[in-house]
Amino acid sequence: MKQVFIKTTLILLLVGSLMACQENGDYKEAMKDGAYQISAQTKLTDVMIHDIFSPPVASRIYAYSSIAAYEVAVLADSSYQSMMGQLNGFEKTNFDTSVEIHYPLASLAAYYKVATALIFSEEMMNAHYNTALKEIKSKGIPSKVFENSLALGESVGQHVLDYTKKDNYHQSRSFEKYTIRNDPGSWQPTPPAYMEGIEPHWSKIRTLTLDSANQFISAPPTVFSSDSSSQFFSEAKEVFNIVSNLTKEQKDIAFFWDCNPYKMNVKGHVMFAEKKITPGGHWMGIAGISSKTANLDWKGTSEALAMTSIALFDGFIACWDEKYRSVVIRPETYINRFIDEDWLPVLQTPPFPEYTSGHSVVSNAAAETLTHLFGDSFHFVDSTEVAYGLPIREFNSFRLAAEEAAISRLYGGIHYMPAIVNGATKGTHVGNHLLAKVKTRKDENNSAIAAKSEEIK
């Protein structure tokens, strides 16, 4: 009995000692990397695929959720700079940090607060959040600190949600639908679903950094003509010829960057949607992969996700502004009318006008931002599409990845070259404007991530 008592006492002392260590601050080491931030984003992507959000709307959800997480990093580390006062209409406010807070947990709480409020399937996001909280509780964070952290995350998240309410999104839900024009050169719905034009008023959404949706207006598209000697016919014939003679590599590239959440399949009399990631979701995946590759902590990860999401958000607004101004006919429609009535593109044509290419704009906007953060020659393995049945692709820079994403739309048969080239230019302007307007580090050069990236090469 004496030995049993001694062993029991020793066990209790050991447990008490471990708890004391946790109470003395060992728990502060928990969640130091960006794993929980990346996991939350991955789940958000899954939910948005389930809910079938359009690419522009998905970019809005990514942006506000990521901004909320980043703003907690600012409170945790004085070397970071708040986006309040830098983003359009994002008013400054103060948060109570006088109590002890576990900031990585607060950042996660802010992310889930905003993300859950902006999606449809809240129960899916809440279930993922609750599972994460149970795991985090086991890391020994004192109950009071745990509660303080969730409260701060709630407060920051609510401030961001208040910010979302003034961006004209909810008002735009009641705007009129796009009216199909009768002129032969304008966009028409395409098979198999002949869906109406998506988000025709997206240019009216408040930008985050751009002065206006048309700040970087593109050169006018090629003048429409059905004449076989015209420039427009030549551009359409280029699409026709490329698609008719694709190499395996070109076809692989087209499918890798497809990112079409609207893909409809027809079997007999049944039509059903094949749910896919959006182009913004793909680039947010790249931002997460790069953060992990660079061994960033949770603050650096939050910074990378926030900056990338802002580039995507403004990129979509700038792109959609041009799409519904020029309303250019898609290659599928043109080629079927004037070249070959039986021709089909490799990829399913998305339900909105052709000019400029959305992939070209947002990919280049994101690439400029990520290049600034991680460096010009950053090698990464893009496994974003593995979950959707596609293999990995490797890139030696973000700009090379953006270049491939842009040209993939020609290989897919859904864009003419001017939309790709001019879209890439627009995206580069959007990304550089963001970097000029928003500073996330007090030293104003955001050099910390790029320097760390150089170390791991």
Image (spheres, rainbow, N blue to C red):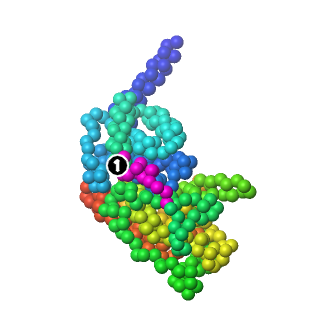
Locate residue 442, reporting x and y percent.
25, 55
Please say whether residue 78 is one of the residues in the magenta stretch.
no
The residue at the far right in this view is: 268
Q: Total label count? A: 1
Q: Which residue is mark 1?
A: 166
Task: Give the main secondary structure of the magenta stretch.
Answer: loop
Left or right placement of residue 429 versus residue 235 in this view: left
Residue farthest to the top, as pictured? 1
Q: In this rendering, would 177 be left or right of 105? A: right
Badge 1: how crowded within 10 Å, few (<14), some, or many (20+)?
A: some
Which residue sits at x=50%, y=40%? 122
Query: Is 173 part of what is drawn in magenta?
Result: yes
Residue at left offset 67%, top offset 74%: 341
- Judging depth in this view, the residue of 433 and 349 nearest the camera is 349
Residue 407, can we see it?
no
State which quadrant residue 219 falls in: bottom left
Residue 32 image offset from top left, x and y in percent = 40, 45
Q: Nearer the viewer, residue 453 or 364?
A: 364
Residue type pointed to by label 1: Lys
Spot occupied by residue 343 in the image (x, y as percentages of width and height): 66, 73
Residue span colored magenta: 165-178
Of all residues shown, which one is farthest toward the front?
A: 182
In the rendered view, tell whether residue 99 sits above or below residue 54.
Answer: above
The residue depicted at 54 percent of the width and 69 percent of the height is: 182
Side (left or right) of 372 relative to 197: left
Location of the C terminus by quadrant is bottom left
- Label 1 residue SS: loop
Residue 342 percent across, percent down from the top left: 68, 73
Above or below, 434 against 22 in this view is: below
Does the rendering let one see residue 134?
A: yes
Q: Residue shown at 26%/60% (left/top)?
A: 444
